[in-house]
Image (tube, rainbow, N blue to C red):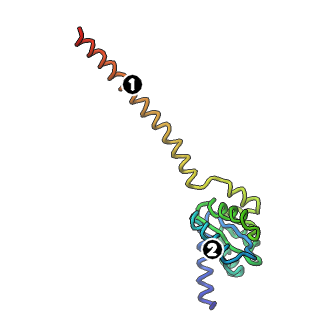
Amino acid sequence: MDRAQKEKLVDELGQIFESSGVVVVARYEGLTVAEMQDLRARARGAEASVRVAKNRLAKIALDGKPCESIGEYLTGMTVLTFSEDPVAAAKVAEDFAKDNKKFEILGGAMGENPLDRAGVTAVSKMPSREELIASIAGCIGAPASNIAGAIGAPASNIASILSTIEERGEAA
């Protein structure tokens, strides 16, 4: 890799560190190519990404970034799992770690907040952005449907009363 390629990689990593809601660092020593492909596929499915990069270049890219604290984890064979959603990458990493004992989560960062191993686990148990949006939409939608029902109910009651009066008037 020549200097220009290294500079491009550092820029790419810098963008990742700048824009990601969460970054998880893990050791992947001993994983097969098929297992790494499985990790990447799971990440894609959750709108997250996986990146293997030279630790030295990743540390350069971290300089001045919000998640600079993950630099301490960048030793040995490490892989980065990241996503804009502050929960997705942590969920992917945790689920993959349960199935693959060779995949060892070291820690990570959620914005400027450093995460140790337990922190990554805690983040992975939080609801995702989509789950939160669905929950909020449900909370907002329920009162609206109740109001519509309340507004519509008296009108239907009035209509039935008028209908009854009209029928009595015709009978008399």
Farthest-out residue, front: 34
Q: Which residue is mark 1?
A: 154
Name the spot of residue 6 as percent of width and height, x first: 63, 86
Residue type pointed to by label 1:
Pro
Q: Which residue is mark 2?
A: 37
The numbered dot on residue 65 is none
Q: Residues within 10 Å of mark 1 (few under 14, many from 20)?
A: few
Q: Which residue is nearer to you in this view: 108 or 145?
A: 145
Q: Secondary structure at mark 1?
A: helix
**Which of the two discs, 1 and 2, sits closer to the camera?**
2
Query: Which numbered disc, 1 or 2, marks the residue that appears first in the sequence?
Result: 2
Q: Which residue is nearer to you in this view: 116 or 39?
A: 39
Name the spot of residue 47 as percent of width and height, x first: 56, 65
Classify residue 97 as left or right of residue 41.
right
Instruction: Give the Cα separation between the discs numbered 1 and 2.
Output: 60 Å
Name the spot of residue 112 as percent of width and height, x first: 68, 63
* Image quadrant where residue 38 sits: bottom right
